[in-house]
Image (cartoon, rainbow, N blue to C red):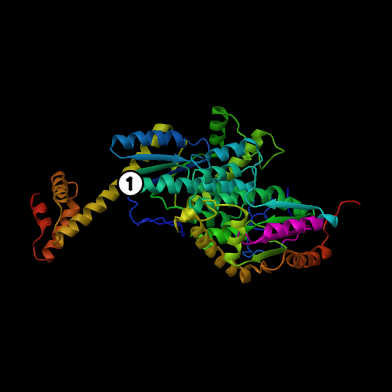
Amino acid sequence: MRETYGKLLPEMKLADLTGKLIVIEGTDGAGRSTQIDLLKSWLEELGHAVLDTGMTRSTLAGNGIRRAKEGNNLGRVTQSLFYATDFVDRLENEIVPALRAGFIVLTDRYVYSLMARAMVRGMDPQWIRSIFRVALKPDAVFYLRLGIEQLVRRVVFSRGFDYWESGMDLFPGHDMYDSFCNYQAALLREFDRLSEEFKFETVDASADAETVFWQLKGEILRLLEGDSRKTFLSMLARGAAGHPLQKAEEEAIAAAARRQSVTGDLEFVSQAFAAQAPHGNGQAAIRQK
Amino acid sequence: MGISPGIRNGPFEVCTPLQPAVSTAKKRGEHRFPGKLFVVEGIDGSGKSTQLSLLHKWLESRGYGVVFSEWNSSPLVKDTTKLGKKKKLLTPATFSLIHSTDFADRTERSILPLLKAGAVVLCDRYMYTAFARDVARGMDREWVRDLYGFAIEPTVAFYFRVPLETAIGRLLDARDGFKFYEAGMDLGLSDDAEESFRLFQGRIINEYEKMIPEFGLTVIDATLPIEIQQSRVREIVKSHVATGTGWRPEP
C-alpha cells in the first residue's frame, strides 16, 4: 500500500494507486529532462502509459510563479509556499489520478528539490519538511549527481546565467558567476544530505546521456519486474491454497512455466503443495511444465 | 541582511543564507520588534472590519504610524487565487496553500519590515482565519499550524464573537447571495448557498472557539453596540502602544 510522509490530504485514497511513481532529481545541468524524454518513449514502447510532470506545470500556480519570478521580488517564504501550492495542485490533479489509472509517473524533480532550495535560502528544515508530509512516497528516486565543477561548466556554457538558478536573490552584491557557484554548491550539499535521509539511488550524471539512460533503464526494469513478480507469486500462492484462479491467471502461470523464467518460484510452490492435499488449479499449471 | 539571531520567528530567525539554523523554539513567542501588531478575527458579518477601521482612525489621529494589511491581498499572489476561485480549481489543500502564500508575501514584504521600523500594523484577518477555515474544510489541524510556522505572533488578536444567526442577518441585509468558497460550497454540504454558508460557518465558529484558549485570543462580544466594542478595543490597544516605542511622525 502506498504511503505519504505522514499526513493525508482530505479525500485522498491510497488504496488503489497501482501505478509507479518515479522521481528524477538532481541539480541544474544534470540532464534530468533529457533522461525523462528518453525514458518516456522507451516505457511507452514497452507498452506502459506514462505521465511526465515537473515544477511550475500546474494549471493553478504555474503562470503565477513565472510572473512572480519576473519581478525578482519574490520573498523566500513566499517562494517556498508558491512552489508547494504548485506541487500539491499537480499531486491532486495529475499524479494521483494517473497512479490510480495505472500509469507510470515520471516526475522531473519532486519535493526534495523544493526542500533543498528552501533550506539553502535559510528556511527552517523542520518547517519545510512538515509541509511536504502530504507528499506520496515514490517507488524510486534517481538522483542524477554532478560534481560542482562539471555542473558549473555544463550550465554556464549551455544556457548561461539565470537570475534564480544563480541564487541572485541570496547574493545580490555578487556577480552572476560567483553567486552561481556559491548557490549551486550549497544546493549540492543539501541534495547530498537529502540523498541519505530519503535513500536516493545515486546515478553518476557526469557520464554521457546514453550511459546514464542505460543505467536508469536497468533500475526501472528491476522495479517493474519486482512488481509483476510479486503479483505472480501471490497468484501461485492462491492457486496452491486451492483458491480458484481466473483463466487469464492460469494462462499467465502456464506461460511463465514454459519460459522457465520462474523455476525457483515453482519449486517453492511445489514444496508448498507437497505439504498440502494436492488439489486446486495451481497444480494444473505446474503440471504443464 | 536581516534580523538579529536572537529573534525567534519561525524561519525568520535565520539571517545568514547558506547556514540554516534549526529552530529549537516550536512555540511562537511574542515578537521583539519595536512595532505593534493588532489583528481582528471573526466570521463574516461579525463587524470586525468596522471595528478595525475605527481603530485605524483613532491611532492615526493620535499620531501613530499605522499600516493596514488585509487578508488575501498580496499583489504577487492574488491573481492566482482569483484564477483558482473563478475556475473552481481549488481543493481544501491548494486553498490552504495559496492563502498561506499570500500571507507569506505580505509578511515578508510589509508586516515584518514595518514592525522592525516601529509601525503599528493592523491586519484584517490573520493566520487564525486559515486555522479556522482550512480545518473546517477538512485539513489536518497540526499541518495547517505548521504551515504558518513563519507567522509573527500578534501583540493582540481580537476575536469578535457573534451568534451565527446575527451574522447571517447582517450579511443578508447588506447584499444578496453568498460567494462559492465563502459559503463552503466546494464541500458539497448543501446545494443551497445560504444553508451551506450556515453549516460551513458553524464549523468555523467551532474552530475559533477552540482557538481562544489555544492562542489566547481576546474575545469581544460583537453583539454589543459598536461604540462599546470600540471603546474596549481602544482601551486594550492603548495599554500596549503606551508602553511600546510606537513610531510617531514628527509633529
Image label count: 1
Determine which quarter of the picture holds residue B54: bottom right
Q: Residue furthest right?
A: B251
Q: Residues within 10 Å of mark 1 (few under 14, many from 20)?
A: some
Q: Could you say where residue B183 lies in the image, as x and y percent from the top left?
A: 52, 55
Q: Is residue B25 left or right of residue A56?
A: right
The residue drawn where x is 62% and y is 66% is B162
Is A2 magenta? The answer is: no
Determine which quarter of the picture holds residue B37: bottom right
Is B58 magenta? The answer is: yes
Q: Nearer the viewer, residue B63 or B5?
A: B63
Residue B28 visible to the viewer: yes
The residue drawn where x is 83% and y is 60% is B245
Q: Could you say where residue B40 lies in the image, as x and y percent from the top left?
A: 68, 60
Residue type pointed to by label 1: Ala
Q: Is residue A44 left or right of residue B233?
A: left
Q: What residue is pinned by disc 1? A: A101
Q: Residue furthest bottom?
A: B213
Q: Could you say where residue B211 lies in the image, as x and y percent from the top left?
A: 60, 67
The residue drawn where x is 55% and y is 67% is B206
Residue B18 visible to the viewer: no
Q: Secondary structure at mark 1?
A: loop
Q: Nearer the viewer, residue B162 or A204?
A: B162
Residue A30 vertical position relative to residue A201 in the rendered view, above or below: above
Residues shaded magenta: B31-59
* Chain bearing mark 1: A
Residue B160 vertical position relative to residue A116 in the rendered view, above or below: below
Q: Could you say where residue B165 lies in the image, as x and y percent from the top left?
A: 57, 65
Q: Nearer the viewer, residue A190 or B92?
A: B92
